[in-house]
């Protein structure tokens, strides 16, 4: 399933609502460095690949904007290790 993840730039996060449950990936942008700080998917929406879709949306946005990435969120750090196409984004 291809989700249309929303980039809520004013709140510094990526969002998706699944069955009424808000799922988010939060970041802090400092200059041209995106520090991804937290990914949250409620248990009721878990196991559906939502966190991966949020991470991909954030990383693709970083690439489009020429940002470097600091994966402070442990989930995103593992996601980048598993998906070699994003490793060049690491700050």
Image (cartoon, rainbow, N blue to C red):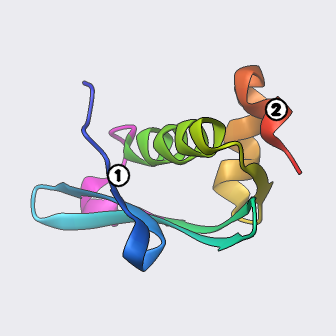
Residue at the right extreme? 91
Q: Position of residue 15 (x, y in %)?
A: 32, 60
Give, as a single range, the part of the protein colored magenta.
Answer: 40-49
Residue sitting at x 89%, y 51%: 91
**Looking at the image, which is closer to me, 26 or 48?**
26
**For the N terminus, which image quadrant?**
top left
Identity of the residue furthest to the bottom in this view = 11
Q: Which of 23 and 46 is in front in this view?
A: 23
Secondary structure state at the residue bearing disc 1 = loop
Q: Where is residue 8 in the image (x, y as percent from the top left)?
A: 35, 65
Disc 1 to disc 2: CB gap under 8 Å? no
- Helix, strand or loop at disc 2? helix
**In the depicted structure, whether residue 77 falls above or below residue 87:** below
Nearer to us of marks 1 and 2 is 2
Q: Residues within 10 Å of mark 1 (few under 14, many from 20)?
A: few
Mark 2: give few (<14), some (14-19) or many (20+) Cα within 10 Å: some
Vertical arrangement, residue 67 with respect to residue 4, above or below: below
Q: Work out whether 9 lies above or below 79.
A: below
Measuring 75% from the left and 59% from the top, which residue is drawn there?
32
Residue at image coords 58%, 36%: 64
- For label 2, the residue is 87
Observer-nearest of 82 and 35? 35
Residue 25 to residue 68: above or below: below
Relative to residue 61, is residue 50 drawn left or right? left
Q: Is residue 5 magenta?
A: no
**Residue placed under numbered mark 1 in the picture:** 46
Quarter residue 13 falls in: bottom left
16 horizontally vs 65: left or right: left
Give the percent coordinates (x, y) of residue 74: 72, 59
Main secondary structure along the magenta-highlighted residues: loop
Tag of residue 18 = none
Give the percent coordinates (x, y) of residue 28: 64, 74
């Amino acid at each position: 399933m291809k989700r249309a993840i929303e980039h809520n730039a004013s709140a510094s996060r990526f969002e998706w609502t699944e069955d009424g449950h808000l799922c988010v990936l939060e970041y802090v942008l400092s200059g041209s460095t995106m520090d991804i700080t937290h990914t949250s998917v409620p248990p009721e929406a878990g196991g559906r690949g939502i966190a991966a879709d949020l991470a991909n949306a954030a990383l693709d946005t970083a690439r489009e904007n020429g940002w470097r990435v600091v994966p402070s969120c442990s989930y995103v750090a593992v996601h980048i290790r598993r998906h070699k196409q994003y490793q060049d984004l690491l700050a």
